Amino acid sequence: MLSVALAGKPNAGKSTLFRAATMADAEVGNYPFTTIDPNRGVSHVRTDCPCLTREERCDNERCRDGKRYVPIELLDVAGLVPGAHEGHGLGNQFLDALTDADAILHVVDAAGGTNEEGDPVEPGSHDPVSDVDFVADELERWLAGIVERNWESVERRSRSPGFAIDDALADLLTSVGASEHDVAAILRGLDYPADPREWNGENRLALARELRARTKPTLVVANKADRAPAETITRLREAASVVPATAEGELALRRGAEAGALEYDPGDPDFAVVGELSDAQRAGLESVRVAMNEYRGTGVQAALNAAVYDLLDHITVYPVQNESNWTDGQGNVLPDAVLLPRGSTPRDLAFAVHTDIGEGYLHAVDARAGRRIGDDHELAEGDVIEVVSTAK
């Protein structure tokens, strides 16, 4: 399962966003390091279900009238403070927790109500634009420190006959979570000395920056956007790729829908009141509606979608056993949805379903078109694929 981490300074609203996106309990408090151990939960990305092209909607529990929710892991990491890469504020422990993530959502307090340490201040007195590069910079310097601590082994290897710097760097980078494909891309993007003894701190930091960008792509979530001036959101968008959001608003909507007072599906641009609400509740929800009208939703689902479909460039594919009915062996319509990197093939899908299915792979059928497809066929978003395998 893909993993997306929430990171940022204390009190930016990470744990509230986590609770809203997972409906799981997570401690929330207006003081630093409310979260110590990372919270882990299951959230979802939203896409159009292929059942929209059929006369009837599927009865899958993760499909809501054609809105398909595909599970991902969400990780809420404790607040980071300046100097985290040097261990400030338990920073090394918290940065280490990010190594499990495929992508990072950097949650920023767009209302400017917390200073650079995460302490509460008068709203608007801190400029959130100054926080935009914070998490990426701390991660890069932390990774550079790991590279530096392991550099002596690279230098020792250089004394051996047949030494190749590319091979040594590949071994080093895969040890900190990069895949062979990542390593090839990272090294293509760098100019570096062939002799490791000629490397300096800037060379290692450049390597760490490429490693972070490739293996931990980051998107900024401008949380508390409903309390932030429009000019601040504009400046944040000019500084980085940003999704404005109100985690508190999303949490209120999900709780209201769970209680039967609202009609709302995560990611909808609006909601409807269908139950009894107090005047205070109605007033609070109307303020959420104003923000939703401005940003086409609360931004929480949009941020998760952007992390998976844009940052990680994944697609959703639906494996079935019966190409005509789009069912599994028990007759369930569109039973599974699999997230795959763009460019994946039917064989990749087979292995994603199960190793035995992949090892016994024979061929695949495009169930939408009703035709067999080649092993090198690139799958696309929303494909419904019958995988034919010797394994059952």
Image (cartoon, grey):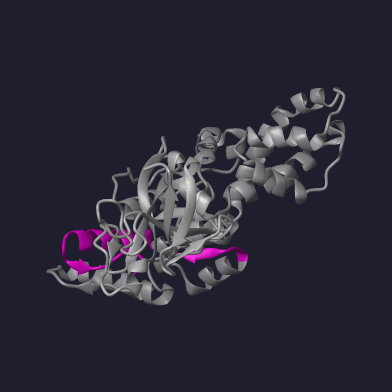
Q: Which one is nearer the viewer's eye here, 119 or 37?
A: 37
Position of residue 254 measured from the top left corner of the image (x, y, whole percent): 27, 60
Position of residue 34 measured from the top left corner of the image (x, y, whole percent): 39, 41
- Image quarter of the C terminus: top left
Q: In this rendering, would 228 be left or right of 55?
A: right
Q: Is residue 47 above or below residue 138?
A: below
Question: Residue at 45% across / 42% down in the picture?
Answer: 77
Q: Which one is nearer the viewer's eye here, 348 or 360?
A: 360
Question: Residue at 63% across / 49% down in the picture?
Answer: 214
Q: Is residue 322 above or below residue 87?
A: below
Residues rendered magenta in the picture: 239-268
Residue 166 covered by magenta stretch: no
Q: Which one is nearer the viewer's eye here, 175 or 257?
A: 175
Q: Is residue 296 visible?
A: yes
Position of residue 319 measured from the top left corner of the image (x, y, whole percent): 40, 55
Q: Which one is nearer the viewer's eye here, 315 or 375?
A: 375
Position of residue 308 measured from the top left corner of the image (x, y, whole percent): 49, 57
Q: Is residue 37 above or below residue 348?
A: above
Tally of numbered tags: 0
Residue 260 covered by magenta stretch: yes
Q: In this rendering, would 254 be left or right of 79?
A: left
The furthest residue to the left: 276
